[in-house]
Amino acid sequence: MDLSFSAEERAFEKEVRGFIADNLTPEMKRATALTPSVFSDPDIGMAWQRALHKRGWGAPGWPVSYGGPDWTPAQRWIFEAECARAGVPNINVMGVKMVGPVIIGFGSQEQKDFYLPRILSGEDYWCQGYSEPGSGSDLASLKTRAVRDGDHYIVNGTKIWTTHAHHANRMFALVRTNDTERQQDGISFILIDMKTPGITTRPILTIGGDHEVNQVFFDDVRVPIANRVGEEGKGWTYGKYLLEFERGAGIASAKLREALRTISDLAESDVTGRAIDDPDIALRMSEVEVDIDALEMTELRVLSALQTGQNPGAVSSILKLRNSEIRQAVTRLGVDVIGHDALAVEPVRPLYRLNHEPPVPEEILTVVPEYLNGRAYTIFGGSSEIQREIIAKLVLGI
């Protein structure tokens, strides 16, 4: 396994750093640093998406024929690692990294021609309609139903924990189109215009105080059958394909390393009374750093496998599991490092637009919200229990 970068790859690294320096504004960087939730708000994230699109870098991982850059896996790793180190905003992950690859793999030519350019440009902002009340990890039990009526489906039901549905103009959703003995065989994958009559979005405030997720209700919503991706009843296959991208499409170790560096800087500052002098804090930081090193090596092993044409397979579940656990360990450290300041609460969002003096210094404003929001990391995208089952079956052969 060759983990070293070539001279050409080092030149690309320099090119990426130059692009970031030219396009990442101080406002973008500050807003990203003061966003405790998983995704950047669209006004920040989509501005970065447009800059990437203008450069031709809007969709790493997409084939060149659909607008992706002609990058090797190593270049993609360099790009995402440099973006993490610089603190760039998140793009609309659900468009570029989730539904985009599904449309490329299984969509009709008309769907590709219409949706893919709009994802790249940022014209469309997507949300995901998977989970339902009572159907989360057991997603195949979903109840939202789509009944044929001429050249449309009539959709009724509800989706929950729908991230950024209040911002999105489009949703990709799994719906039940048939009752079959095997639940997975009756599910289809459809694309929904969120402005269609009959759709109601209700906010859910998370424990961290953020409005990031929602419950979405469908009451006799008409969706063209032309908006179904692939075959009717094959949605479970397409949905699982999408989840592989959700779990393993990014380079997590670089973001985790930057998050730990931020906590380490706080621990060494007077703001926290030099919390690093506490032996327990220092030991835990060292342990987390080792865990991040191990995760990075696993990501590089996947990179090496991709470069030789191998399929990493169930390793995506290992990456998702460890990323979630390490991220929670980092946020726990953050709360312990700031001590009594963790009791202060700033309820106003977004934090980067406060027009009053916050109760604690700005550099620690996001510590507690990130910790609270981070409790969900071991649940969304497939719970840790599900990931362990996949690893046991497909990696360990148990």
Image: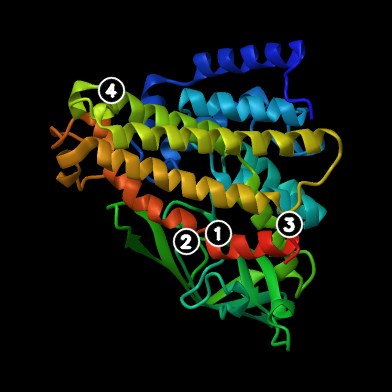
Callout in the foreground (2, 4): 4
Between 233 and 171, the one nearer to me in the picture:
233
Tell me the distance, in whole angstroms, between the alpha carbons under discs 3 and 1.
28 Å
Indicate the amino acid at tag 2: Thr
Tell me the distance, in whole angstroms, between the alpha carbons under discs 3 and 4.
41 Å
Residue at the image position 72 percent from the left and 49 percent from the top? 101
Between 111 and 339, the one nearer to me in the picture:
339
- In primary-sequence order, the first of circles 3 and 1 is 1
Residue at the image position 78 percent from the left and 64 percent from the top? 230
Q: Look at mark 1 in the image and give the residue it sits on.
A: 128
Kindly indicate whether the residue at mark 1 contacts the one at mark 3 (C-beta within 8 angstroms).
no
Between 51 and 325, the one nearer to me in the picture:
325
Tell me the distance, in whole angstroms, between the alpha carbons under discs 4 and 1.
40 Å
- Mark drawn on residue 162: 2
- Secondary structure, mark 3, is loop
Indicate the amino acid at tag 1: Gln
Kindly indicate whether the residue at mark 4 contacts the one at mark 3 (C-beta within 8 angstroms).
no
Mark 3 residue crowding within 10 angstroms, few (<14) / some (14–19) / many (20+): some
- Expressed as whole percent of the image width and height from the top left, the position of residue 305 reads 80, 38
Q: Look at mark 4 in the image and give the residue it sits on.
A: 268
Mark 2 residue crowding within 10 angstroms, few (<14) / some (14–19) / many (20+): many
- Mark drawn on residue 308: none
Decide: is 248 above or below 44: below
Q: Can residue 276 be spotted in the picture?
A: yes
- In primary-sequence order, the first of circles 3 and 4 is 4
- In primary-sequence order, the first of circles 2 and 1 is 1
Q: Look at mark 3 in the image and give the residue it sits on.
A: 395
Kindly indicate whether the residue at mark 3 contacts the one at mark 2 (C-beta within 8 angstroms).
no
Kindly indicate whether the residue at mark 1 contacts the one at mark 4 (C-beta within 8 angstroms).
no
Residue at the image position 73 percent from the left and 53 percent from the top? 103
